Amino acid sequence: MYQSEGRDFWDLGAQNSFMRYREVLYVLVSRNLKVRYRGSLLGVYWSLLNPLIMTSVYTLIFGTAFASYYDNSIVRYMLGAFSGLAVLNFFSSSTTQALTSIVLNGSLMNKIRLPVSIFPVSMIAANVFQFAVGALPLLMMMTLLISHSLTNVVVLFLPLLALILVASGVGLLVSALFVFFRDLSYFYELVLFLLLISSPIFYPQEIVPANVRAILVFNPLSSIIASLRQIAISGHAPDYSLIGHALLSGALTLVVGWICFKRWHHQFMDLL
């Protein structure tokens, strides 16, 4: 049954498979956002409230101590903390929601012929929409006011693309693993905490010892945050080596996540 009704996008074989995937994705994203924010006062802007509050807390506690790494400017420290928190908040919320997406929609896959990957991808897409109407306008405004360069504003989208690639790869991976290991959600909370600590969000990367920094380079969010800050708050032209590193990390993460997902998805229906 799974082979005929639950196969993934590339196995559908229909002439209009891409159009169908896009239409189903739109429906699922719309449903996700409506259910999540039904009756909410601020709607999707709640996703912006968390990084703003945490930025204020970090600035009050660490602003004076770390301002010297931001041209002796507490304001720049605040902007740097906000950009890091915006990245982590997007990654955390999108991958956490993607983690349970297949299991929660298992009954639906038994009734309707749907590509399995549509569920984690729809969670990522819903969070992309939230980010686009929430944190992104602030990041663009911040970049323009500091750099006075439209080039920096445009190039800002490249590390954000890398962020979407990383979140998509991890989302596909954890959603597939959750089908086999239902207690993965508890372990993933620890993973997110380790990402918070190992990502230069509330502290500058320069204070990390060189031997530890060599290990943290494997954190895909670090290069994204570094590139985003360099473009947005340094006031200099974009560093394309940083951007390239971020995009490479994103592409590799997506490839690994997709390969694992494709290798395991044929076993899903036996476990749902």
Image: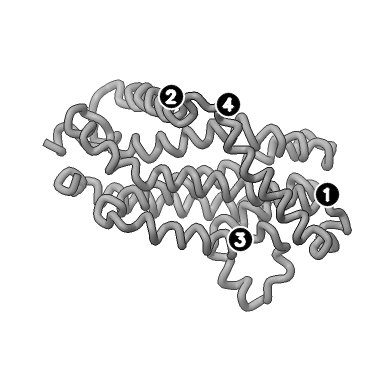
Of tags 3 and 4, the one toward the viewer is: 4
Task: Name the residue that disc number 2 marks.
Answer: 30
Task: Name the residue that disc number 1 marks.
Answer: 75
Point out which mark residue 125 bears: none
Q: How far apart are marks 4 and 2 (CA)?
A: 18 Å
Residue found at the far right of this picture = 72
User: Residue drawn 47% across and 25% down?
Assistant: 38
Residue 118 rendering spot, x and y as whole percentages = 34, 35
Q: Is residue 266 visible?
A: no
Q: In this view, does 224 lie to the left or right of 203?
A: left
- Mark 2 lies on a secondary structure that is helix
- The amino acid marked with disc number 4 is Leu
User: Residue drawn 18% across and 28% down?
Assistant: 111
Q: Reply above or below: 175 against 1.
A: below
Q: Can residue 226 be seen in this view?
A: yes
Residue 100 rendering spot, x and y as whole percentages = 34, 45
